[in-house]
Image (cartoon, grey):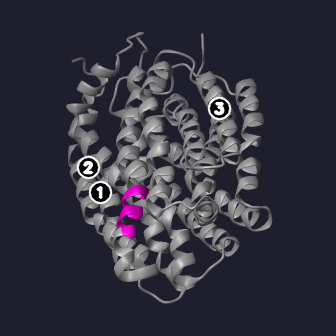
Amino acid sequence: MNTVPTSSVRRYVLGILLVVYTFNFIDRQILSILLQAIKSDLGLSDQSLGFLSGFAFAAFYATLGVPMALWADRGNRRNLITVSLALWSAMTAACGLAQNFWQLALARIGVGVGEAGCSPPAHSMLSDYFHARERATALGVYALGIPFGVMFGLFLGGWINEAFGWRKAFFVVGLPGVLLAVLVRMTVPEPQRGQVDARVDDGDRPGFGETVRFLMRRPAFLHLSMGAGLASFVGYGFITWFPAFLIRTHGMKTGEIGLWLGLLIGVVGGIGMFTGGVLADRLGRRDYRWSAWMVTVAFLVSMPFGALAYLVDSPYLAMICFIPSVLAANFWQATTLAQAQTLVRLRMRAMASAILLLIANIIGLGAGPWAIGALSDALTPRFGADGLRYSLLIVGVLGFWIAWHFWQGGKHLPGDLARADERL
């Protein structure tokens, strides 16, 4: 019979999964710093590059997350993460072998297939290692893999591209993940479900349809997932296209962009991610609604600074102006992921995470980079190199809509949490 894990085991598992998620985002987002080099080498349009960054990855990543989550809710989550990590790492390296658009698209699809098996089982595992009162903080630490991965991807991608070309960059970041997969398999224990919450795992194994019906009756989940999707739309669009904006508008080189933008996203984004998780847990103990409402406040306060960043003449001033926006853009992650785990029955956790990620990534990762690229192509005949600047500026207005969804989600949280173990 399993026992509640010790604090040292919990910290170790959280640390290893943080490293896994960091590799996840290195491999996912390194393409952004390499877009201009790939565009020049393969002769691709902005819309094609947006497809490679968005739909080519997101369509498979988001949709395959559902069957992967079904496996995770019914089987061994640690083993699923191991296999997935090895696959996406190998396919990242394969991107460096591509000779045309279609070969690169197929490799990116392979990365998406592998990464679909990472977060849903990881969220479910961590929810069985950390109690609900500390879950947002734990998932906030796990989510640090996003800014850390983007930071290291920009660092490595920018400098390797300048020194050796874009193909070598894919090899360097992809292959070490295969070794990490072995470490996960050998050292991470699979936890007993419900152990830290004193909730009994009755063996109930709801399917996709039952989980969807369950979540459709939770207004808090619907609003939080839509807010997450729109926040991802803006966030992924920024991460994908801001390097190209700095090159076209301000004449910066990829190595310099990798350094400064990597620090902005990695350090400031990491602070926002961790702070968002801690605030969600602390404010939620007093009034659970504020675990979502704090995201509303953060977006409304930061929006003017984000708009100013696209209008100033200095690239360094632009990145300084973006500090409040990068902080706010990372507040939603931890609390939304934590609520998705707490709102549902024990063997719905991975599936709830997958559905949340499906919504967030189809709207955000899938449509965001593509839409900004398409809008840039449409504006370029009139504004030249500034077409991308105004495309990014227009998309930033979505912050008002994001803020509204998190406000509405917070209003419904207390009532929906009280029905977490309800049967349909």
Label 1: few (<14), some (14–19) or many (≥20) C-alpha neighbours in 10 Å: many
Kind of residue at badge 1 = Trp
Q: Tag 2's secondary structure? A: helix
Residue lying farthest to the bottom in this orientation: 313
| Viewer-side residue, 375 vs 215 | 375
Q: What residue is shown at x 69% (from left), y 36% (from top)?
A: 90
**Mark 1 = which residue?**
293
| Viewer-side residue, 211 vs 31 | 31
Label 2: few (<14), some (14–19) or many (≥20) C-alpha neighbours in 10 Å: many
Q: What residue is shown at x 79% (from left), y 62% (from top)?
A: 164
Left or right placement of residue 161 versus residue 35 in this view = right
Q: Quadrant of residue 371?
A: bottom left
Q: Tag 3's secondary structure? A: helix
**Mark 2 = which residue?**
410
Kind of residue at badge 2 = Gly
Q: Position of residue 208 (x, y in %)?
A: 34, 21
- Number of labels in the image equals 3
